[in-house]
Image (spheres, rainbow, N blue to C red):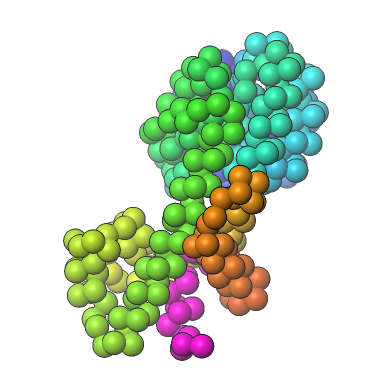
Amino acid sequence: MQIGFIGLGNMGGPMAANLAKAGHQVTGFDMADVSIDGVTMAESAIAAAQGADVVITMLPNGQILRAVAADIIPAMSEGAAFVDCSTVDVDSAKAVAQQAETAGLLAVDAPVSGGIGGASAGTLTFMAGGSEAAFGKAAPLFDIMGQKAVHCGDSGAGQSAKICNNMILGVTMIATCEAFALADKLGLDRQKMFDVVSTSSGYSWTMNAYCPAPGVGPQSPADNDYQPGFAADLMLKDLRLSQQAAESADADTPMGQAATELYATFVEQEDGLGMDFSAMLPRFEKRGRD
């Protein structure tokens, strides 16, 4: 396929490189001066989109997505697919999809899970929203960039799945960190705590696969001074998107709201900026009960 790829940062760059490595013709654009193996760089987003069978975007937020979409949709060929892999608010995803479909395009919102490592290794998970036809056109590319793609429903469903998943993740990480900090103050050895919880009803991904305690469980960012695998500020972004969606849908999410407030404090008032989201553990270690 002829693919346009707009947004070649830490995630988009390796995703585009994997598509080029698989034999597709990839034309890319980014606001920064970047060079990606196998990708021909265009002078503008419009130039990258012209003549493409599929245009993929990986952008920072909904406002930028809307602006890029307004530029490139008129330049795209009728019947082409617009696949947005950014994590943005549900309303922006739906608005851009409607704009694309009105212009005779196929539209997919397909945010990803798996981080920078998954983007490089081609092991991402895609959560996709859009028509069956749109998903079908994008599916072969998902197979190259990832290990799994789930068609979640109509436009906006991909973003909905992503933010619900990450709301669970944020809440669960806080609970895991709180529990380790409590165990410390009760004099419980961290390894013993892990051995019990990881095989008991407290089992979770944050405990078993991404343990926030250094030297316990599989290798994780905690073993690398909490250098980000998934940055705390990105978790805060996703939690805020979850609460924006909850407000729009009139959904009661008190734990999601509490997690949002805690990560906001951690990132914006404490030392969480630039740290992994599991660095909540040393935060709780230093704190007593208010």
**In front of the other: 135 or 152:** 152
Q: Residue at x 20, y 62 (%)?
A: 200
Question: In the shown orientation, is residue 85 left or right of residue 121?
Answer: right
Give whichever of 87, 51 is nearer the camera: 87
Q: Does 280 lie within the magenta span?
A: yes
**Up-down: is 118 above or below 75?**
below
Q: Which residue is at 44% across, 67% downward?
A: 174
Against 40, residue 220 (above or below) is below
Residue 180 shows in this picture: yes
Q: Quadrant of residue 17?
A: top right
- Residue 60 vs residue 101, the one in the foreground: 101
Q: How many numbered marks have been drawn onto this rendered protein structure? A: 0
- 244 on left or right of 232: right
Q: Position of residue 118 (x, y in %)?
A: 44, 43
Instruction: Confirm whether the magenta stretch covers residue 210.
Output: no
Q: Is residue 70 above or below residue 33?
A: above
Q: Is residue 253 above or below residue 79?
A: below
Quarter of the rendering occupied by the N terminus = top right
Q: Residue at x 50, y 28 (%)?
A: 153
- Image spot of residue 36 (x, y percent): 60, 36
Q: Is residue 224 visible?
A: no
Where residue 94 sits, quadrant-wise, is top right
User: Residue 93 appears at what percent x and percent y?
Assistant: 65, 35
Please report the bounds of the magenta region as a residue range: 273-290
Front-most of residues 18 and 73: 73
Residue lying furthest top: 78
**Residue found at x 59% / y 68%:** 261
